[in-house]
Amino acid sequence: MPIRHGMTCNQFIAEEQRQFPAATGEFSEILTRIVLAAKIVSREVNQAGLLDILGATGDTNVQGEDVQRLDVYANTQFIDALSRDCYISVIASEENEDLIHTDESSQHRPGKYALALDPLDGSSNIDVNVSIGTIWSVQKRVSEGPRGTSADLLQPGTEQLAAGYIIYGSSTMLVYTVGRGVHGFTLDPSVGEFLLSHHDIRMPARGGIYSVNEGNSPYWTSGTQEWVKALKGKDNPSGEPHSLRYIGSLVADIHRTLFKGGVFAYPLDSKNPEKPRGKLRLLYEASPMAMIAESAGGAATDGRQRILEIQPESLHQRVPLYIGSRDDVEFASSFHREGVEVR
Ligand code: P6P
């Protein structure tokens, strides 16, 4: 079947698999499970105001953040969809301090794959109806034996087999890559299918938008302050003062950057001394988004090196992030190479 606009995501996954005659279908099954969970979570997110599922649970997660009920729901749906008789052996989720070992009774054990998951990123925006999202990444296991280990997740981002996000916004879109281009699928709720709407998305080489929380500027390094000052002038890749757009929801800010170009950044800041390496997490935020950015012709660094080349040291490790158009990320990195220690 040729790739055509409007084909379902599952049809697309099957067509992509046909490019690999030796494929067993296990990897494709993982992708179709993600599609299923995305449909279920999208339904709840879009009805949240009606189903009294809004609001916090009163718990805090491993990040010390208030857990919203939809966070818990999304985490459960993705873990269930990928645990039962699937090929994932182990999951690292933002919502869980420790590794999740999937269904021990699964007939497919031990699974050959591992999943990193941010089940509902930007959840603080849930109650005010701002777009939120799920971020995911699939790796091949490197450990032996019946149960996955953290080593299966603590691999550089270059080892990711697939990465993607779902943005629950004015429409729900699933955007993913297996390293052969980035493709977007828009959910048609009337038929319950994600339909191919954006084939082979290419990020502009530069853009006129920068996206950063300027409220943190008193806590930035001098390099970051100089960088943002340059963006407000003409001495930058576009030659014009940039516009500032900041939604405060990573998936939404990066989704806009993917299509319009420019740069999103969450720099180091001295505001949170207990988070000495930035706010965003490497395994299930920066690394999957970096694979998407690079597959679309963009770039992603921590200010000094490719995000994809960082060797993770812990499941919930944080990193500074500069991601977006190639020229804009290079420009941002040029202000940060000397060192990333905050003042
Ligand atoms: P700030 C949401 O909580 C999140 O993790 C990302 O989605 C978003 O990019 C960032 O934090 C926003 O952080 O400190 O600007 O509110």
Image (spheres, rainbow, N blue to C red):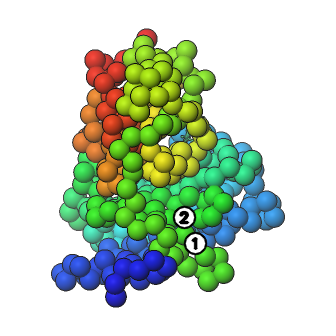
Q: Earlier in the sequence, mark 1 or mark 2?
A: 2
Q: Front-most of 243 and 103? A: 243
- What's the residue at 23%, 79% (across, down)? 19
Against 100, residue 281 (above or below) is above
Q: Can the viewer see residue 91?
A: no
The CB of the residue at mark 2 lies under 8 Å from ligand 1: no
Residues at circles 1 and 2 in contact by the CB criterion of under 8 Å:
yes
- What's the residue at 31%, 51% (across, down)? 297
Q: Can the viewer see residue 255?
A: yes
* Residue type beneath disc 2: Met
Q: Quadrant of residue 301?
A: top left
Q: Quadrant of residue 176?
A: bottom left
Against 13, residue 132 (above or below) is above
Residue 53, percent across and down? 75, 59
Question: Which residue, given by chain and number where applicable, does mark 1 sit on?
Answer: 187
Q: Quadrant of residue 199?
A: bottom left
* Residue type beneath disc 1: Leu
Q: Residue furthest bottom?
A: 1
Distance from disc 1 to disc 2, alpha carbons, whole Å, reads 6 Å
Mark 1 secondary-structure assignment: strand
Mark 2 secondary-structure assignment: strand
Against 124, residue 259 (above or below) is below
Q: Front-most of 10 and 328? A: 328
Q: Which mark is residue 173?
A: 2
Residue 108, percent across and down? 33, 79
Q: Residue furthest left?
A: 22
